[in-house]
Amino acid sequence: MQTSALPDLAHTDARPVHWLATATVMAAVVAAAGLLQPDAGTATASASEHGVSTQHGSAPAATAPDPAEVTFPLDCGTAGHTVADSAPGDLDGDGGPETVAVVHCTAGSGTPPSGVYVVTQPSGAAPRVVATLVDPARKLTVTDFTVSDGRVSATLLGYSSGDVPRCCPDELENASWRWQGNAFIKTAGPAGSTTRST
């Protein structure tokens, strides 16, 4: 048998006590490294906790009023009314959404005139109509309705006289409304060269 020219290494003739001591020292080194160095998991958790506390500290996100819960100023008799279209939007810039609803009386046939209403819901209160943009008394039909960037837009179809059949509106107007100061201001223009605006 050949003997090594190198001096004997202590671990080549190790006893169980030696391995236990080595394992204990290694565990202590790993634990110390964990305490001295921030790990990514802790940093992420701290950021998440900060985000949650910031979110809880801010005002809760408001939901737009539900037009199904509103009594609209329409005289429909026993027929009731139909919300034909609705869309949410922050119209007055206060951070809380309003709902704009296109509503008409329920009819078995024909096209009843539409109303366009702005609905708001103060905290803890029932939703209510705060503005009428299109009064059904004008006998208009509302199409192409949108709410975007604080502006309400719609196409209004109407009649130039009582002699025009109710099936066939002969006037068409593009209209939009924007909150300015303390009221909704309407801007309008004709939608095409072959139609008349009201």
Image: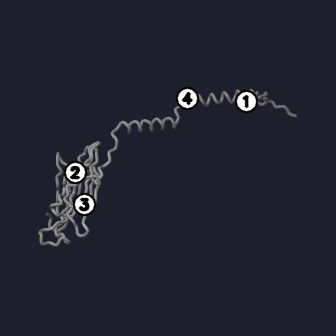
Sequence-first disc among 3 and 4: 4
What crowding class fits label 1: few (fewer than 14 Cα within 10 Å), some (14-19), or many (20 or more)?
Answer: few
Q: CA distance from mark 2 to mark 3?
A: 17 Å
The three-letter amino acid code for the residue at tag 2 is: Val
Q: Secondary structure at mark 2?
A: strand
Say which residue label 4 marks: 35
Q: Secondary structure at mark 1?
A: helix
Q: CA distance from mark 3 to mark 4?
A: 70 Å
Marks 2, 3: nearer the viewer: 3
Say which residue label 2 marks: 129
Sequence-first disc among 4 and 2: 4
- Where does residue 95 sit, x and y in percent of width and height? 28, 44
Q: CA distance from mark 1 to mark 3?
A: 87 Å
The three-letter amino acid code for the residue at tag 3 is: Gly
Foreground residue among 144 and 141: 141
Sequence-first disc among 1 and 4: 1
- Where does residue 174 sit, x and y in percent of width and height? 20, 61
Say which residue label 1 marks: 19
The three-letter amino acid code for the residue at tag 4 is: Leu
Left or right: 5 with respect to 184? right
Residue at 24%, 66% in the rendered image: 107
Say which residue label 3 marks: 80
Which quarter of the figure is the N terminus placed in?
Answer: top right
Which quarter of the figure is the C terminus placed in?
Answer: bottom left
What crowding class fits label 4: few (fewer than 14 Cα within 10 Å), some (14-19), or many (20 or more)?
Answer: few
Foreground residue among 179 and 116: 116
- Where does residue 165 sit, x and y in percent of width and height? 16, 72
Q: CA distance from mark 1 to mark 4?
A: 25 Å
Q: Secondary structure at mark 3?
A: loop
- Where does residue 88 sit, x and y in percent of width and height? 29, 52
